[in-house]
Structures are given as structure tokens and as C-alpha cells.
Image (cartoon, rainbow, N blue to C red):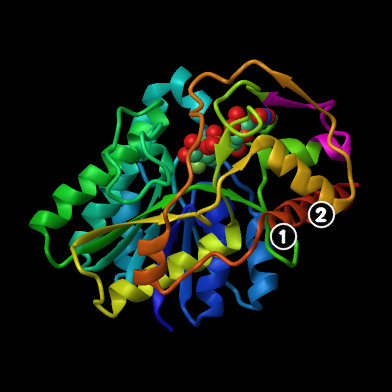
């Protein structure tokens, strides 16, 4: 079986990708320091795939440990690099934490790919690289604006580091995947999103409010220039997103890429406001969301959604699940999570 190294493979998107890789006959090798995840995720992955997925626990900012692990798995056909901090607000307060972790681990990954002749890299990037675009939907050639947060800047710098690296090391090819807003959970409810403390993101906040863990959802901003005044995002189901990673690694493995470093937007192409998401949640689950419209959250953009034509065409991939499937999936996961706690 072909090995694929999955850094951050115990995280939200990483764990779903490890499952999709295993489903397609790849052998995922998970690297994670468990700083923002738990070992129980591995049980979920193993149960879903009926396999014993390899797990290497260490910190990718440790260059010696990274080199040692990549040497051990030098027969891997590629690396999918998720491992990174991702809380936008925290990155504003603790910028060096983000620069040190997100940039150093990427550099160590690239160095060890080079020294062990591992040829293919998929990089976990973000729509955040676009900031508030002047024209919607955003295409891959939409200009990159100044980042809104250190987190967003680490994604911009990361893409640039990869550019410079593959330009001089032609034997390595890369794809940067710019995610829009991943939500939902695996159908089995054995893996899903595990927010640390109070959720920053919309869907876990909605599901925890409806479950009674939080009192009410604060909808940040009601006077945006949108159809109902609330901010618009392109939500994508995490399993659809995970599948795009498998398509991307296949593209590089079969040398179908048209450049040493390609970029793809991963979304559904449809923008939904916060109130649209609440409505979809209520419709798909039959539960009411207690919410209040409050002041805007600093750093938020008004509206962003993807043009996904390039990803559809070049990856042979299209997101399938709609907003109601996604909100229902997030709710099923919340219920399962709490039923196993009690
Ligand atoms: N929102 C609320 N109330 C909340 C949480 C969110 O109204 O309690 C609103 C936000 O203001 C925004 C929308 O819901 O309009 C989505 O917010 P999220 O926090 O879920 O996601 P973001 O669009 O802010 O995305 C950010 C980064 C992405 C990153 C993502 C997940 O921009 O790069 O968080 O970490 F991938």
C-alpha cells in the first residue's frame, strides 16, 4: 500500500482525510503532537477504516524528530501537511506562537521531504489568504491582499515558501488547497470537530447552544451589506473537503499537474449568511437556535465565497453535500459526542 504522511492527522480535517485515504487504498501515516486533539481520534479512524493506522507522536518544529520520522517513511509517495495552529483571534494575541509553529514546521517538512526524496506535497491553505476580495466569487487568481491576522499571514507566507522551494527543487511538486469554511462530521459520528473550550467557529457554537452547553449564539454583525445584514461564507462539508485531498495527491502522483505549485479553491461555490445557516440548521434538525445579533467581530470580512470551477475541472472533484446535510451532520456529531460523555 502506498504511504501518505498526514501531519496533523488527528485534527478535524486531517482525521477525515486519513479516513478517505485509507478508503482509497492508501496507507496514511499520521504525525501529530496532540496539542489540539486527542488519542481517541485514532480509535475513531481505526474503527471506521477497520485498520490499524500508524501514528507517530512528535512536534514538527523539532527538525531532528521530523527527519528521523521521514527517514523511517521515506517510501511515502507524498505528504499532506495540516499541522498548524488555526485560531484567528488567538493568533492576533500570540503572533509568535503562530509564526514559530506554523512556519517552522512547514520548513522542517520541506527539508525532510527533500532529504528523503518524497516528491509530492499538499498544503493546507485557506480562503483567508484573499482577505475581503473586491470581486465575488473568488477565483484562484483573485489578488492576495494584506492578511487580516497572523494566522492568515502564516498561510500566505506558507504558500510563498513552497513557491520558492519548488522553484529550485523541481523534483518536488505541491498543491495548496484554499479551504473555505469546513463544517460537519463523518457519517459514522466516530470522528468530527472537537473544539477546545469555547468554540470560535459558527457551527460548533450553534450545536453547543442547541445542546444547552452555551446560553445563546451571538451573531456577529447585523448590518453588513448582504441580503439579511449578516456575513456570508462558503460552508463545505469536511468529508467533501477530505476527498479533494485524495484527488490532489492522485493528481501529483500521476504527474497530471500543470505547474510545480498549483492552487485550488475548495468550497461549494455558494455563499450563505449566518442567518441562512441558522435557518438551514433549524430546518434540517427541527431544533430552534437561540440567538442574538450583536456587534461585528473584529477581523471578520463581509462576504467570501468560491469560484470552484478550476478545482472541479482539474481535480475531477465537486462538493456534493448541501447546507442542510452539513448542519444536520454537525448536529448528529454534537449529540453523539455528548451521549458518549455521560
Ligand atoms: N459567527 C457568529 N457567531 C459565532 C461564530 C461565528 O456570528 O459565534 C460568524 C462569523 O462572524 C462569520 C461566520 O459566522 O461571519 C463564520 O465564522 P467562523 O468563525 O466559523 O469562520 P471564519 O469565516 O471566521 O473563518 C476562520 C478563518 C478560516 C479558518 C476558519 C476555521 O478565516 O481561515 O476560521 O478556523 F479556516
Q: Position of residue 140 (x, y in %)?
A: 31, 51
- Position of residue 308 relative to residue 206, above or below, is below
Determine whether label 1 and label 2 are within 8 Å by CB.
yes
Q: Position of residue 59 (x, y in %)?
A: 42, 45
At horizontal 35% and vertical 29% (from top left) the residue drawn is 147
Q: Which residue is mark 1?
A: 325
Rendered-image quadrant of the N terminus: bottom left
Q: Is residue 75 visible?
A: no
| Residue range of the region highlighted in magenta in the rendering | 209-219
Is 220 placed left or right of 307 in the picture?
A: right
Q: Quadrant of residue 167?
A: bottom left
Q: Which residue is mark 2?
A: 284
Q: Position of residue 137 (x, y in %)?
A: 42, 46
Is 301 placed left or right of 265 in the picture?
A: right
Q: Is residue 188 visible?
A: yes
- The reply to whether the magenta stretch includes residue 314 is no
Q: Quadrant of residue 273?
A: top right
Mark 2: give few (<14), some (14-19) or many (20+) Cα within 10 Å: some
Q: Position of residue 94 (x, y in %)?
A: 44, 21
Amino acid at each position: 500500500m502506498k504511504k501518505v504522511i498526514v501531519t496533523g492527522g488527528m485534527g478535524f480535517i486531517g482525521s477525515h482525510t486519513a479516513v478517505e485515504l485509507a478508503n482509497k487504498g492508501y496507507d496514511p501515516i499520521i504525525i501529530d503532537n496532540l496539542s489540539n486533539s486527542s488519542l481517541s481520534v485514532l480509535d475513531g479512524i481505526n474503527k471506521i477504516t477497520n485498520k490499524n493506522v500508524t501514528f507517530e507522536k512528535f512536534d514538527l518544529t523539532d527538525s531532528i524528530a521530523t527527519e528521523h520520522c521521514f527517514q523511517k517513511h521515506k517510501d511515502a509517495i507524498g505528504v499532506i501537511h495540516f499541522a498548524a495552529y488555526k485560531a484567528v483571534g488567538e493568533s492576533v494575541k500570540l503572533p509568535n506562537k503562530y509564526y514559530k509553529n506554523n512556519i517552522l514546521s512547514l520548513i522542517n517538512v520541506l527539508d525532510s521531504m527533500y532529504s528523503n526524496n518524497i516528491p509530492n506535497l499538499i498544503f493546507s491553505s485557506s480562503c483567508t489568504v484573499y482577505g475581503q476580495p473586491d470581486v465575488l466569487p473568488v477565483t484562484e487568481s483573485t489578488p492576495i491582499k494584506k492578511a487580516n491576522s497572523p494566522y492568515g499571514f502564516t498561510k500566505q507566507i506558507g504558500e510563498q515558501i513552497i513557491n520558492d522551494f519548488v522553484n529550485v527543487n523541481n523534483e518536488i511538486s505541491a498543491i495548496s488547497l484554499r479551504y473555505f469554511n469546513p463544517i460537519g462530521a463523518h457519517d459514522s459520528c466516530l470522528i468530527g470537530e472537537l473544539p477546545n473550550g469555547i468554540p470560535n467557529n459558527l457551527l460548533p457554537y450553534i450545536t453547543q447552544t442547541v445542546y444547552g452547553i452555551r446560553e445563546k449564539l451571538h451573531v456577529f454583525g447585523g448590518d453588513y451589506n448582504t441580503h439579511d445584514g449578516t456575513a456570508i461564507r462558503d460552508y463545505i462539508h469536511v468529508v467533501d473537503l477530505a476527498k479533494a485531498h485524495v484527488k490532489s495527491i492522485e493528481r501529483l502522483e500521476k504527474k497530471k499537474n500543470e505547474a510545480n505549485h498549483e492552487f485550488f479553491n475548495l468550497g461549494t461555490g455558494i455563499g450563505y449568511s449566518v442567518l441562512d445557516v441558522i435557518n438551514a440548521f433549524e430546518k434540517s434538525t427541527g431544533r430552534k437556535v437561540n440567538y442574538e445579533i450583536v456587534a461585528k467581530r473584529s477581523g471578520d470580512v463581509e462576504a467570501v465565497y468560491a469560484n470552484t470551477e478550476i478545482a472541479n475541472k482539474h481535480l475531477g472533484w465537486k462538493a456534493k453535500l448541501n447546507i442542510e446535510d452539513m448542519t444536520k451532520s454537525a448536529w448528529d456529531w454534537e449529540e453523539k459526542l455528548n451521549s458518549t460523555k455521560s
